Image (cartoon, grey):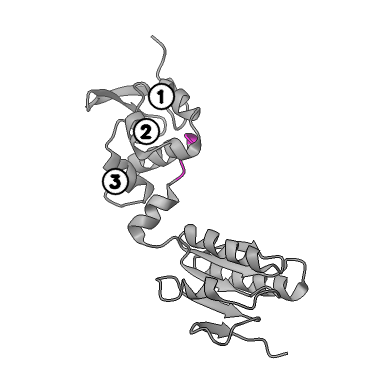
Amino acid sequence: MSRVKCPKCQNVERILKAGIIRNKQRYFCKECVYHFIIKKVQKDNHILSDKPASQVSLQDIASVAGVSITTVSRALKNRPDINIQTREYIKELAKSLNYQPNILAQSLVNKSTHTLGVIIPSLETTVFSTMLGGIQEVASKAGYRVIICNSNENHETEIANIQGLMNHLIDGLLICHSIQTSSYEHIRIHIGKRIPIVQFYRVASGLPISQILAED
């Protein structure tokens, strides 16, 4: 029988059996004072490590760790009602399995993606890149990510960009219109939805949405 190794400190000399939990052997490492379960961990780790990160689920982690899905969820959220050793073990295990939370699923629950969409006419023009830098700085401080789209001064690309951002369930849209844009039906159809829209620099005065103008 192979010797049991502590997943935290890799020690194999000071490992004791510490009872049975959910029909799985629990161990205790005297070296780093750590409880763990290793039944099928190596096999499951090998299987799960071959999965794309997006496919590793809370259930997968729970199966390897020998705990419930609820325990895994609470541990990854740093809930204080989970034993600190169990919490750290689950977090390390999730990291080793390349687990990535499902942002879309979380957004459906929280009704927020903490993501803003920004459409600018050109990434090469200094004034637009400066504006973009300011937007990113403020958004980051507020805890938001920014998805940037470049319309390349093309009206059709601007329309496609808006639809793509809306499909990503953004929380807000900031747009500087392309130089070709003269009709704004692609904006009107989204007015009144839950997503606020802000125009900046190049704006359409007839739209009932917020505007930010430059004072040249």
Other residues around mark 2 within 10 Å, as few (<14) / some (14–19) / many (≥20): some
What amino acid is found at the position of numbered circle 2 in the picture?
Answer: Asp
Q: Which of marks 3 and 2 is in front?
A: 2
Above or below — where is 80 with respect to 20?
below
What amino acid is found at the position of numbered circle 1 in the picture?
Answer: Asp
Secondary structure mostly taken by the magenta-highlighted segment of the chain = loop
Q: Distance between the residues labelled 1 and 2?
A: 9 Å
In the image as oriented, which residue stretches furthest toward the bottom?
A: 215
Q: Earlier in the sequence, mark 3 or mark 1?
A: 1
Residue 99 lies in magenta, yes or no? yes
Residue 103 lies in magenta, yes or no? no
Secondary structure at badge 3 equals loop
Residue beneath disc 2: 60
Which of the image's four quarters has the C terminus?
bottom right
**71 or 84: nearer the eye?**
71
**16 or 82: nearer the eye?**
82
Q: Give the residues in magenta.
A: 96-100
Above or below — where is 135 with respect to 44?
below
Secondary structure at badge 1 equals helix
Q: Residue 43's image quarter?
A: top left
What amino acid is found at the position of numbered circle 3 in the picture?
Answer: Ile
